[in-house]
């Protein structure tokens, strides 16, 4: 048997190793450190290749590729979104990702990204809220208590100082699940019977629902002045969570407009409606919240640079640990031009 050299072995982080790494470092520290990594990359946003993700839509869901590069590293994520999967006992969202060296094209990391996407989404949400939410925000409404909800709540506690979360989901079992999962994280957790009850006195409202439809999780009369809305459920054309009138009353912030106009809440608006790219706020190029009574809205659909940051962050965290495996993914003939000879020699071993 011909054994591959170390240079041909690619680090792979499995779901088991991802869980072990997070538990080893600590969930809140992971979220804080990951938010810092994303913030650093947002500050160099113009350096990155940017394009809307490549999507294949069906009547049951979407499958997407999300690529980007900073000129030194290249990364992509494969991700799906299939809301009906939960009825079959399957995840709504699954993902994996790869990071590669631009100079050689060789992969540097392959990883599961179902867990990592939940972490980076929560870290991004809380990072943006740090810039946009009302000062001294303490209460968050969490509308939609599926797979992402606990990560969001813990990130907002760790990064923004949230002390109380009010949970609501049309599925009371999902709310009970989130309530139990959050029991030991230092948050006051309240189960609510309606979205109206959940958002009462909330400083921040996070919406994260899965149904692929033009929904109105929040209607205009429900949203008072001065709140920050973190709308993260939008991820495809024809799927929204907020009534259009809320958008018209809000100052809207997005990741990458060309993608958000296709998939986000702003697909309901004319293309000339004013929006602000969040990287401009983080770099000081544009203003965030300008008055206490203002409604700020982060229309988040997720963007490839956030996944790039997460993969780069993960690569540093697994160094000198046992939280990865080495995969034989690359052909490594003694003579790079003699791939056929390598195959022939393997047949004689």
Image: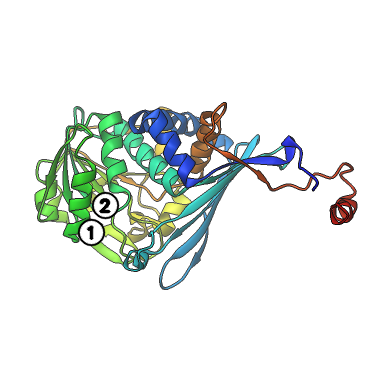
| Residue with the mark numbered 2 | 247
Residue 261 or residue 98, whichever sits in front: 98
Q: Which mark, by number, is residue 323?
A: none
Name which residue lies at 46% across and 30% down.
37
Q: Position of residue 201 (x, y in %)?
A: 10, 41
Name which residue lies at 39% across and 57% down.
235
Residue 112 or residue 41, whichever sits in front: 112
- Mark-to-mark CA distance, 2 and 1: 7 Å
Which element type, helix, strand or loop, lies under badge 1?
A: loop
| Residue with the mark numbered 1 | 243
Which element type, helix, strand or loop, lies under badge 2?
A: helix
Q: Give the side of residue 204 with respect to residue 276, left or right.
A: left
Q: Position of residue 129 (x, y in %)?
A: 30, 35
Name which residue lies at 18% across and 46% down.
179
Can see residue 334? yes
Q: Position of residue 23 (x, y in %)?
A: 38, 34
Q: Residue furthest bottom?
A: 59
Q: Position of residue 289 (x, y in %)?
A: 27, 34
Rendering colour mode: rainbow
Mark 1 is surrounded, within 10 Å at the Cα level, by few (under 14), some (14 to 19) or many (20 or more) other residues, namely some
Residue 225 occupies quadrant: top left
């Amino acid at each position: 048997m011909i054994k591959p050299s170390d240079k041909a072995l690619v680090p792979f982080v499995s779901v088991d190793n991802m869980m072990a790494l997070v538990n080893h470092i600590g969930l809140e520290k992971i979220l804080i450190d990951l938010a810092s990594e994303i913030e650093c990359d947002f500050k160099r946003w113009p350096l990155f290749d940017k394009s809307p993700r490549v999507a294949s839509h069906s009547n049951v869901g979407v499958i997407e590729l999300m690529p980007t590069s900073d000129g030194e590293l290249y990364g992509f994520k494969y991700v799906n979104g299939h809301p009906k999967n939960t009825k079959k006992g399957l995840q709504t969202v699954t993902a994996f990702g790869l990071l590669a060296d631009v100079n050689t094209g060789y992969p540097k990391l392959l990883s599961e990204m179902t867990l990592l996407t939940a972490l980076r989404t929560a870290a991004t949400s809380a990072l943006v809220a740090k810039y946009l939410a009302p000062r001294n925000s303490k209460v968050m409404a969490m509308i939609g208590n599926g797979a992402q909800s606990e990560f969001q709540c813990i990130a907002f506690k760790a990064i923004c100082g949230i002390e109380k979360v009010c949970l609501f989901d049309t599925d009371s079992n999902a709310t009970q699940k989130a309530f139990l999962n959050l029991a030991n994280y230092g948050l006051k957790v309240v189960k609510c019977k309606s979205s109206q009850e959940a958002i009462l006195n909330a400083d921040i409202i996070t919406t994260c629902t899965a149904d692929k439809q033009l929904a109105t999780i929040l209607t205009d009369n429900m949203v008072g002045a001065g709140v920050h809305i973190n709308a993260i459920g939008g991820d495809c054309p024809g799927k929204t969570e907020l009534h259009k009138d809320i958008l018209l009353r809000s100052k809207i912030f997005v990741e990458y407009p060309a993608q958000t106009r296709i998939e986000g809440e702003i697909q309901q608006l004319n293309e000339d409606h004013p929006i602000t790219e969040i990287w401009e706020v983080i770099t000081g190029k544009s203003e965030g919240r300008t008055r206490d009574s203002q409604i700020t809205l982060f229309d988040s659909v997720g963007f490839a640079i956030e996944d790039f940051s997460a993969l780069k962050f993960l690569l540093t965290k697994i160094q000198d640990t046992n939280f990865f495996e080495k995969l034989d993914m690359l052909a490594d003939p003694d003579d790079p031009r003699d791939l056929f000879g390598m195959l022939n020699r393997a047949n004689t071993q």
